Image: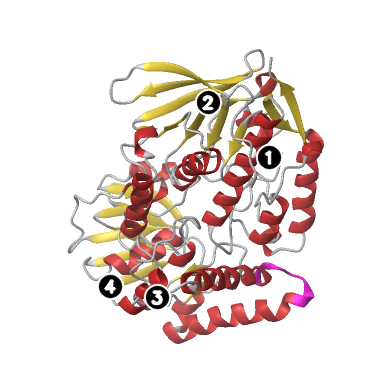
């Protein structure tokens, strides 16, 4: 890249990274390998790294992106056991990678950032944090902050379920000490987590009451086992792994056409819709049940889920599918709008996460004392989703206004981190204490997203995590991952304002 790795006086900025999931680990590694910068710390809330893949340990938890694309491009894993890796295997990969690059020694575990505020006079971020083991409160300063607080970390639990008196938990807080064998189990929610959990527990429970809020489009998941020969070829025969990686990436990238309403993409949309329809038809022969499981919105508006065992599972005798609204909860019973009542032993909530409101108020205070939770709010003005005019020297890895519907999020993480590395190098080369994107650059990006989204299915009337409470589409990936990479391939000086070091 030809990067500048220090200021002229030989110093480097102090960096704080919030979160030790894929985003935070990627940032730490690239700071070391691309800038030779070791003046950074990672603050992690949990006892171990992993983020999403540490928190989500429910039965059947796995990635719905093919394994070969769910890895860092600079750290290929030749040993994936299957086409789609499970939670444990992904977590082990991330830990192994962190150990290889000595990231563990940079992490402060069980440490929570309580408040981060930009001080213009210091040209630094001042961060208040708490050691959750001792309860002690501390403060530190940083020249640059990476926010790697992923969206799939704060469970969304409707208040009405507080009244349930039996054992209950969210899929992201799975109770592994409780044995479901022979129990009457209720699962609320029909997103990706529920679609993985249901087939994994159905054969051990007595009955499974499944409360579907919205039907999902399901496409088959061909999860083949990677043979020893294939692993050998990946590892020892030049270009084999690289070709598989690229072909898989571009195959996923091509599917962006299925999310477009443009006429030239009609055929791809029709093929994808027919695949989902035929898969549902042949697996659910009962027309009444099949009608319940048939989405009424355009394909792709909500997340498409890959699963080969979910639909067959719902046809089993011990499974009851409910589509009526839950109107009340009392004791161990759930009351539905149609007047029916189900008494169960255990309640499992697959009710999703706080994706759009992931940032708490008073957590990040940007320039001029602006609370970024309120400032971003319903219209997050960011520069390609990675930095904001109000947050100098802060890089948002999968921050506000982001969501991905068709490809690997790790590609996006790497793209954002590499852009941040270029920005830090730019700062040092030009002797700047801070940089921030201009208001115009941010607004131009927001306008472009709004314009591009007019032709995408995410702008249709159905509610999804790509939209905020007002129905505004805030998904970042308006065109394609490759398009996004092309936009962030280099720093555009006229898009930024800088402050010279004293």
Q: Which residue is label 3 attached to?
A: 233
Q: Secondary structure at mark 3?
A: helix
Label 2 to label 3: alpha-carbon separation:
42 Å
Q: Earlier in the sequence, mark 3 or mark 4?
A: 3
| In the image, residue 312 above or below residue 444 | below
User: Residue at horizontal 43%, vertical 41%?
Assistant: 159
Q: Residue 292 location, x and y as percent?
A: 49, 73
> Is residue 263 highlighted in magenta?
yes
**Residue bounds of the magenta highlight:** 258-264
Left or right? Give the position of 174 relative to 150: left
Instruction: Point out the frontmost of discs 1 and 4.
Output: 1
Q: Which residue is label 2 attached to?
A: 14
In front: 327, or 185?
Answer: 185
Label 2 to label 4: alpha-carbon separation:
57 Å
Q: Which mark is residue 318?
A: 4
Instruction: Point out the frontmost of discs 2 and 4.
Output: 2
Q: Which residue is label 1 attached to?
A: 380
Instruction: Point out the frontmost of discs 1 and 3.
Output: 3
User: Residue at horizontal 54%, vertical 35%?
Assistant: 146
| In the image, residue 302 above or below residue 82 | above
């Amino acid at each position: 890249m030809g990067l500048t790795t220090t200021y002229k006086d030989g110093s480097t900025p102090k960096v704080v990274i919030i979160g030790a999931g894929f985003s935070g680990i990627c940032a730490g590694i690239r700071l070391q390998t691309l800038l030779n910068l070791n003046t950074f710390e990672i603050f992690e809330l949990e006892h171990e790294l992993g983020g999403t893949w540490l928190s989500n340990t429910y039965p059947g938890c796995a990635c719905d992106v093919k394994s070969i694309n769910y890895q860092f491009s600079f750290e290929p894993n030749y040993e994936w056991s299957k086409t789609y890796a499970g939670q444990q295997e992904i977590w082990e990969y991330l830990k192994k990678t962190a150990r290889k690059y000595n990231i563990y020694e940079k992490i402060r575990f069980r440490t929570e950032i309580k408040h981060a505020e930009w001080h213009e006079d210091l040209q630094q971020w001042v961060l208040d944090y708490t050691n959750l083991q001792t309860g002690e409160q501390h403060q530190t300063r940083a020249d640059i902050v990476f926010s790697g607080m992923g969206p799939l970390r704060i469970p969304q639990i409707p208040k009405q379920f507080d009244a349930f008196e039996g054992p209950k938990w969210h899929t992201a807080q799975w109770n592994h000490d409780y044995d479901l064998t022979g129990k009457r189990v209720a699962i609320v929610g029909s997103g990706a987590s529920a679609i993985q959990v249901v087939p994994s527990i159905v054969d051990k429970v007595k009955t499974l009451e499944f409360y579907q809020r919205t039907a999902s489009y399901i496409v088959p998941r061909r999860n083949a086992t990677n043979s020893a020969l294939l692993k050998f070829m990946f590892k020892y025969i030049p270009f084999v792994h690289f070709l598989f990686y690229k072909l898989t990436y571009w195959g996923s990238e091509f599917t962006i056409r299925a999310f477009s309403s443009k006429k030239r993409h009609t055929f791809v949309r029709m093929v994808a819709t027919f695949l989902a329809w035929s898969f549902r038809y042949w697996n659910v022969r009962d027309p009444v049940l099949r009608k319940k499981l048939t989405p009424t919105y355009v394909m792709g508006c909500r997340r498409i889920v890959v699963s080969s065992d979910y639909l067959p599972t719902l046809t089993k005798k011990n499974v009851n599918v409910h589509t009526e609204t839950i109107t009340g909860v009392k004791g161990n019973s759930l009351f539905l709008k149609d007047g029916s009542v189900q008494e169960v032993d255990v309640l499992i909530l697959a009710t999703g996460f706080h994706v759009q409101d992931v940032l708490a108020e008073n957590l990040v205070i940007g320039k001029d004392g602006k609370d970024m939770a309120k400032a971003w709010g319903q219209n997050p003005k960011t520069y390609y989703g990675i930095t904001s005019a109000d947050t100098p020297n802060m890089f948002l890895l999968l921050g506000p206004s982001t969501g991905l519907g068709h490809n690997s999020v790790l590609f996006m993480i790497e793209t954002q981190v590499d852009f941040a590395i270029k920005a830090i190098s730019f700062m040092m080369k030009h002797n700047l204490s801070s940089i921030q994107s201009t208001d115009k650059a941010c607004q131009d990006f927001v306008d472009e997203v709004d314009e591009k989204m007019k032709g995408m299915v995410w702008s249709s009337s159905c509610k999804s995590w790509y939209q905020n409470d007002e129905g505004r589409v805030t998904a970042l990936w308006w065109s394609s991952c490759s398009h996004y990479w092309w936009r962030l391939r280099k720093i555009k000086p006229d898009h930024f304002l800088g402050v010279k070091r004293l």
